[in-house]
């Protein structure tokens, strides 16, 4: 793979795949993996529809250009043959993946979503039998198969996930719920025969992958149970492992993030459909509804076949699917509730009972009078009514990421305030929060990776300088999203070692997803050499003609020597108070500027290329204004920047040789110039870029 995340676990993938292929008859290794039910032990019909294949390409369809309802671009010719087209893949999986192909396609979708920078052919290979030995070998190498404490199985020589990982004794396996005990209650009540398989998968994940790092991820057990309906035990482990390593795309990994995600969903619902939200609030169903989405993956309200259809889409598009389908379901049921269920019962939970009945009486064709799943898909992706293309006003993924982060910050602030005040009471909305996250009240400095001395003494050792200060790393930890606080800084680029050009910069950072750039101003007339400025980028820097990144990006300034500030603030005692206040006001302070969604975000919607949404003519002028607000990362061969404004300025911009920088107020960030007394322009001394890596194994966070 191209990603460093899997360098420790997939370095031998190519050799292993070749070995597996050599042991199989010619052509057999190219066939797709068949689905198998490890949870309920049901037989899966292996018949494949004509539009799908049992070997690459996954589908090959000749589509007239005038009849392409699930593609979002203009055809170049009258008849187009699509093979493994990403846009066509989205359209096909939204129409449903055939049951015998779900194991293959779910796995490749998860790999593709987890590693967006790698070639599609790499993720597509996980659909085939060529990868069976790799996946099975990884999983079996974790277990003590002979009871000796050493794994001597034939799979052990294929590869190990980590040479220092202790093998797992099967007698030590216990139930792990990751904050979702209801999953075991449901399976016990059902007397599900594959419970022990789920126990092993979750225990293996906790023991070898996420233990001590991810202890609260209530959606993870539910996802694993759904995957086991079509995937083998080893494949479910591998898929969940990838989702844990790239959890930002799939699910929450802390209590605060989980609560923030649910509240962000309610924010979106309230803004887009206030009457629907009001009805749900009046019926006291908000908590139950969000729990069904972000903990149960709709399993408590959808029939099983609908859950599988949802997983078809979720495996590729991630957590945003839950937002889209949750809002769409609330709107569709809201109309039905007023017409059918409001007066049909006097039960106190009639809203919830009606919702379950509405979903279970539905079908994929709408014949049962309940939920029509095809209509739900169209509603979720913005198509209203037959033949009418009225786009659903839904925030793009960068906006959602920032909304969740803002709710997480509010949750943290509230929890800290409650703890300090010693308050004993909680309102009903907070009853779901449970115990506080253990790190809410403690901000530890980010760790720092110190590279070993080079093997060749003639080579100079690359040593981090700008992040060496504990103050700097503590400030960065305070400003980062809570899910990234337990990470280390690993220096990947320094102008003093790697050259001062954008080409060298891109070459060293293009594979690093979460990066922090720190630079020292060459001159500062007010406080010389005592200020650092920089920016956090949520996506890998690379030359591009498009804006990328999301609302989690931020700008910052760090004042290194607080004593200098204090001395200047205290000043001469002979100065009057007004003069001292004016001087203190003019002094730069350590500060972070995060992106804030505009108040009218939901009024006009937010179209974007991600979902190929189209804006009507009445909102085009507003879309132009929104462009400046949603200017995050820009990087070309001539400059790179974060943030922008309608005058052409940037929150922080560097020229092609990284010697000069410019800073002005950026729309959305509402920052002050990072160096107020520099007139917007300043020269750059040392510049360093750090990527965030996991503390447990040093692998880059994706």
Image (cartoon, rainbow, N blue to C red):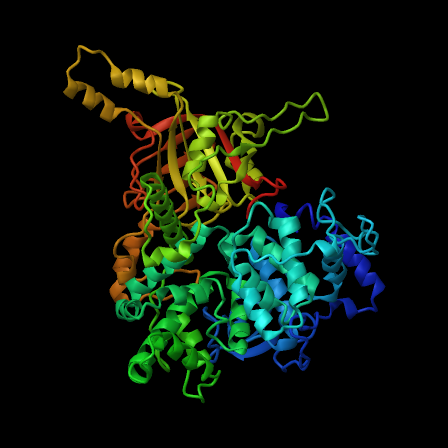
x, y percent for residue 599: 26, 54
x, y percent for residue 218: 51, 58
Left or right of 153? Residue 584 is left
Q: Quadrant of residue 56?
A: bottom right
Residue 474 appears anywhere in the view: yes
Q: What residue lies at 63% left-to-right and 49% top-to-bottom? A: 209
Question: Considering depth in this image, is 16 or 81 the residue closer to the camera?
Answer: 16
Q: Quadrant of residue 98?
A: bottom right
Question: Considering depth in this image, is 385 or 236 the residue closer to the camera?
Answer: 236
Left or right of 678? Residue 29 is right
Left or right of 527? Residue 135 is right
Question: Considering depth in this image, is 166 or 500 the residue closer to the camera?
Answer: 166
Residue 2 appears anywhere in the view: no
Vertical side of 132 occupied by 255: above or below:
above
Left or right of 180? Residue 105 is right
Vertical side of 681 occupied by 264: above or below:
below
Vertical side of 278 occupied by 411: above or below:
above
Q: What residue lies at 36% left-to-right and 42% top-to-bottom? A: 419
Q: Quadrant of residue 474?
A: top left
Vertical side of 518 occupied by 165: above or below:
below
Q: How many marks?
A: 0
Q: What residue lies at 72% left-to-right and 26% top-to-bottom? A: 455
From this viewpoint, which residue is outermost toward the front?
Answer: 424
Q: What residue lies at 75% left-to-right and 56% top-to-bottom? A: 140
x, y percent for residue 671: 30, 38
x, y percent for residue 548: 44, 50
């Amino acid at each position: 793979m191209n990603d460093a995340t899997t360098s420790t676990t997939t370095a031998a993938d190519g050799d292993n795949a070749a070995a597996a292929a050599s042991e199989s008859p010619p052509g057999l290794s190219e066939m797709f993996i068949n689905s198998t039910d490890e949870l309920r032990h049901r037989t899966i019909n292996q018949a494949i529809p004509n539009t799908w294949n049992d070997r690459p390409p996954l589908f090959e369809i000749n589509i007239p250009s005038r009849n392409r309802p699930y593609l979002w671009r203009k055809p170049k010719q009258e008849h187009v043959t699509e093979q493994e087209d990403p846009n066509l893949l989205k359209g096909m999986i939204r129409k449903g993946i055939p049951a015998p192909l779900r194991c293959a396609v779910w796995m490749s979708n998860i790999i593709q979503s987890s590693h967006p920078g790698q070639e599609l052919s790499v993720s597509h290979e996980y659909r085939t039998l060529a990868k069976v030995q790799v996946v099975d070998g990884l999983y079996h190498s974790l277990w003590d198969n002979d009871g000796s404490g050493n794994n001597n199985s034939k799979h052990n020589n294929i590869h190990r996930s980590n040479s220092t990982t202790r093998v797992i004794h099967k007698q030590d396996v216990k139930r792990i719920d990751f904050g979702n005990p209801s999953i075991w209650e449901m399976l016990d009540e059902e007397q599900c025969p594959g419970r022990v398989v789920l126990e092993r998968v979750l225990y293996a994940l906790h023991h070898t992958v996420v233990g001590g790092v991810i202890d609260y991820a209530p959606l993870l057990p539910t996802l694993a149970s759904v995957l086991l309906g079509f995937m083998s035990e080893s494949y479910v482990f591998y898929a969940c492992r990838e989702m844990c390593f790239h959890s930002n795309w799939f699910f929450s990994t802390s209590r605060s993030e989980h609560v923030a995600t649910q509240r962000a969903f309610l924010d979106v619902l309230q803004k887009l459909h206030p009457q629907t939200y009001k009805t749900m609030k009046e019926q006291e169903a908000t908590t139950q509804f969000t729990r069904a989405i972000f903990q149960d993956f709709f399993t408590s309200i959808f029939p099983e076949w609908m859950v599988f259809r949802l997983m078809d889409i979720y495996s590729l598009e991630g957590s945003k699917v839950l937002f889209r389908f949750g809002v769409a379901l609330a709107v569709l049921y809201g109309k039905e509730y007023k017409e059918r269920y409001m007066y049909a019962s006097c039960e106190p939970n009639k809203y919830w009972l009606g919702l379950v009945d509405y979903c279970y009486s539905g079908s994929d064709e709408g014949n049962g009078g309940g939920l029509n799943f095809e209509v739900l898909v169209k509603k979720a992706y913005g198509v209203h009514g037959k033949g009418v293309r009225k786009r659903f006003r839904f925030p793009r993924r960068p906006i959602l990421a920032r909304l969740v982060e803002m709710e997480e910050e509010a949750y943290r602030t509230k929890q800290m305030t409650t703890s300090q005040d010693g308050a004993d009471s909680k309102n009903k909305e907070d009853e779901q929060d449970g115990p506080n996250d253990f790190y809410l009240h403690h901000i530890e400095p980010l760790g720092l990776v110190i590279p070993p001395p080079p093997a060749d003494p003639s080579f100079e050792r690359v040593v981090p300088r700008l992040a060496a200060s504990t103050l700097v790393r503590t400030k960065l930890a305070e400003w980062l999203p809570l899910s990234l606080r337990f990470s280390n800084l690993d220096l990947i680029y320094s102008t003093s070692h790697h050259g001062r050009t954008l080409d060298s910069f891109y070459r060293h950072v293009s594979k690093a997803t979460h990066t922090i750039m720190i630079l020292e101003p060459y001159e500062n007339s007010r406080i010389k050499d005592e200020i650092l400025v920089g920016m956090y980028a949520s996506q890998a820097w690379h030359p591009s003609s498009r804006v990328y990144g999301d609302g989690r990006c931020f700008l910052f300034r760090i004042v290194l020597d607080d004593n200098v500030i204090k001395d200047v603030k205290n000043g001469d005692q002979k100065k009057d108070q007004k003069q001292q206040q004016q001087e203190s006001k003019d002094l730069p302070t350590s500060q972070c500027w995060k992106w804030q969604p505009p108040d009218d975000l939901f009024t006009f919607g937010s179209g974007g290329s991600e979902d190929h949404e189209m804006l009507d003519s009445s909102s085009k002028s507003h879309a132009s204004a929104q462009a400046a607000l949603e200017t995050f990362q820009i990087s070309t061969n001539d400059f790179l920047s974060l943030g922008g404004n309608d005058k052409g300025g940037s929150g922080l911009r560097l020229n092609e040789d990284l010697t000069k920088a410019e800073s002005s107020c950026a729309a959305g960030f509402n920052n002050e110039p990072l160096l107020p007394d520099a007139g917007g322009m300043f020269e750059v001394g040392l510049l360093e870029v750090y990527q965030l890596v996991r503390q447990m194994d040093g692998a880059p966070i994706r």
